[in-house]
Image (cartoon, grey):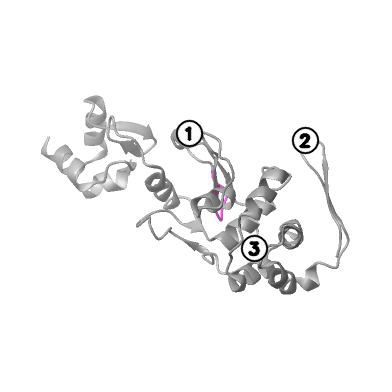
Amino acid sequence: MNRIKDLQTALPRGTPLDSGSLRRLGISSALAHEYIQTGWLARLGRGVFMFPGDRLERNATVRFLSERVPGLHVAGKSALEWHGFRQNLAHRETLCLRGSRNAVLPGWFLERFPARFSAARLFSDDLPPSFGLAPLPESRGGPLVSAPERALLEMLSEVGVQQEVEEARGIMETVRQLRTRELGTLLRACRMIKAVRLCVIWAEELGLPWAGLASEAVADRLETSRWIKLMKDGRTLILKPR
C-alpha cells in the first residue's frame, strides 16, 4: 500500500504512466498487475496506465506520446489555433500532429483526443528537424508546437487533402504578423510547391504585410508550370504560374 501512495505522490496527475516510471519507483510488472486487479491502477494499453478516475490532460498526454514517436509535435491548423490564429472552431476540433516517422496513434489516445497524424516530409533534409518547434511559453513542460511560420506551411500542404480550401484561406487571413526571416527559411526549404505557391499567392491576394518578402524569398520557384489538384469534394484547385 505504501508503494501505491508513493506512486500517487511522485507522479503527476493527468498524464499517462508507463512501465518504466513504475519500475523506477520499485513497482514490478507483477505488482502493477496486482494494482490493476485491486483498482489502484487502470490499464490504457500495453505498458501504459493511469490512475482510476483521473482525467488525462491533453498537453501532458501529447508530451507523453512525443517521447515514443520521433519528432511528434502539434502542427498545422492546430498549432495556429494554439498561437491564437483561428476561425470558428468545432466543438471537438481534430488535433493535427506530425512526426518524422510513420506511427499509429494508440486507440486510448484517440478516444480522448480526436487527432490525425502525418509523417509526410514537408521540408528538405538541410533544415534542422527542430527548426520552428518549441513548447508554448505558457506551457512549461508541454509538447513541441510548430511556430506560426511553420504551422502555416503545414496547414497549406494539406489543402485539398485533409484541409478545406475556404477554411485554410480564412485562417491565413488572420495571420498578419510573422517573422519574415524564419518564414523565408521555411519557404526555401519546403519540398511542396503547392504550399509555397498558396502561401505567396494568397498572402498577396489578402494583402498580408509580409507578402512581398515571402514572394522575394522564393521568386525562383514561382515561375513554373501551373499546378492542378483534384480535391476530395470533386472541385479542382488551380494555381497559375506567376
Q: Is residue 227 above or below residue 27?
A: below
Q: How far apart are the two marked residues, 2 and 3, measured between alpha carbons? A: 27 Å
Q: Say few, some or many: other residues with alpha carbon within 10 Å of mark 1 (under 14 / 14 to 19 / 20 or more).
A: few
Q: Is residue 157 left or right of residue 88?
A: right
Within the magenta stretch, is there residue 145?
Answer: no
Mark 3 belongs to which amino acid? Phe
* Residue 125 visible in this rendered orientation of the protein: no
Label 3 CA crowd tier, 10 Å (few <14, some 14–19, many 20+): some
Query: Which residues fall within the magenta stretch?
Result: 97-103
Check disc 2 and report its element: helix, strand or loop: loop
Q: Looking at the rendering, in which quadrant would you find the N terminus?
A: top left
Q: Earlier in the sequence, mark 3 or mark 1?
A: 1
Left or right relative to 144: residue 152: right
Which circle's residue, 2 or 1, is located before the other in the chain? 1
Q: Are marks 2 and 1 in contact (CB under 8 Å)?
A: no
Measured as percent of width and height from the top left, residue 242 is found at 85, 65
Would you name the residue on which mark 2 appears?
A: 233
